[in-house]
Image: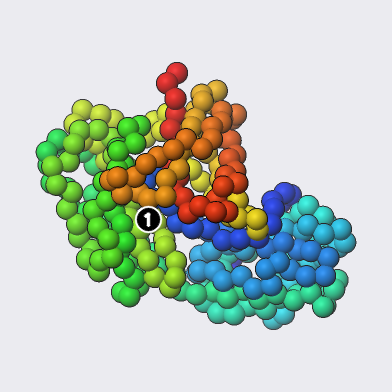
Amino acid sequence: MLKGVSRHVGGLCAGFIVAFSGSTASFAVIHEVAILDGSFSPAQANVIVGDTVRWVHQGTGFHTTTSTTGLWDSSVLLPGESFDYTFSDPGIYNYTSTTDTGMNGRIVVERGYGVNIISPGQGSRFNPGDNVNVQLSLSDPDALVTEIVLNVLHSGATTTLTNQSTNLVFTITNIVEGLHRLTATAYGGGTNRASTPITIAVGDVNPNPTPDTPVITNVTLTASFQMRFIVLGTSGVMHEILASPTVDTNASWTVVGSGVPVDGKFEYTDPAAVVNRRFYRVRAMAH
């Protein structure tokens, strides 16, 4: 089964998304495939159940993306337009352009390895010094929990609880006061997947994120391996993008860019992602 059709103008290149931890999250992944004059690039995209493939017309002629078994048909796309499908079942899906039958592509869809935080729940409150049990669920028993990262919002401090484990219950000991964002990451099928983050409060703080708590969303890796994402934050306030090669307790976070949201968001592209494996977080500056 395929679902989730959309059509829109814009977008670039081809690629896949890596998973992020800390103050970011990796949700449904968008894989971009370029429609060129005479070919699709890449000709084969490997995705996970629940991911979306976005075909972006970068040529000059008229083309379509059409399943060879009739499962989808974009109709004619003009240069600059794009077309989305979300894959919900594993399998091999071949497609072509009806305006040039020499153009052929393939989407290989594998099972996902999702991870979810069952408890504590969003907005849970604890006292400083408490031990907090974190219970997880995995969509596949062969997947491994690679990280549980506790990020103290606005301070940049992180704590990694585990690495390469089949356990589904972990304990944060002697938790410190503050607003914490908790993310779990699992590995399976060659792919890391992060849970939807939850926020918990320790001590006398608001357990629900405020408009000053920015988030990263709509993450895309372009064909030239530049990382692109949208930052949601407070309009008119300067936000800094920080990157680190790791998310452990010794992580060194470096400012790699900045921006000011307009209507609550701005787009950021990291050209250095082509040579660096990076994790990202964003922080709002004082205002």
Residue 237 at x, y percent in the picture: 51, 24
Determine the secondary structure under disc 1.
loop
What residue lies at 55% left-to-right and 54% top-to-bottom?
Answer: 275
- The answer to whether 27 is drawn above or below residue 95 in the figure is above
Is residue 241 in sight in this rendering?
A: yes
In what quadrant of the picture does the C terminus appear?
Answer: top left
Q: Is residue 168 left or right of residue 64?
A: left
Q: Which quarter of the picture shows residue 180?
A: top left
Q: Nearer the viewer, residue 121 or 252?
A: 252
Question: Label 1 belongs to which residue?
Answer: 195
Residue 14 at x, y percent in the picture: 65, 60
Q: Is residue 68 left or right of residue 61?
A: left
Q: Is residue 278 left or right of residue 16?
A: left
Q: How is the image coloured?
A: rainbow
What residue lies at 50% left-to-right and 69% top-to-bottom?
Answer: 49
Q: Amino acid at mark 1?
A: Ser
Residue 124 at x, y percent in the picture: 24, 42
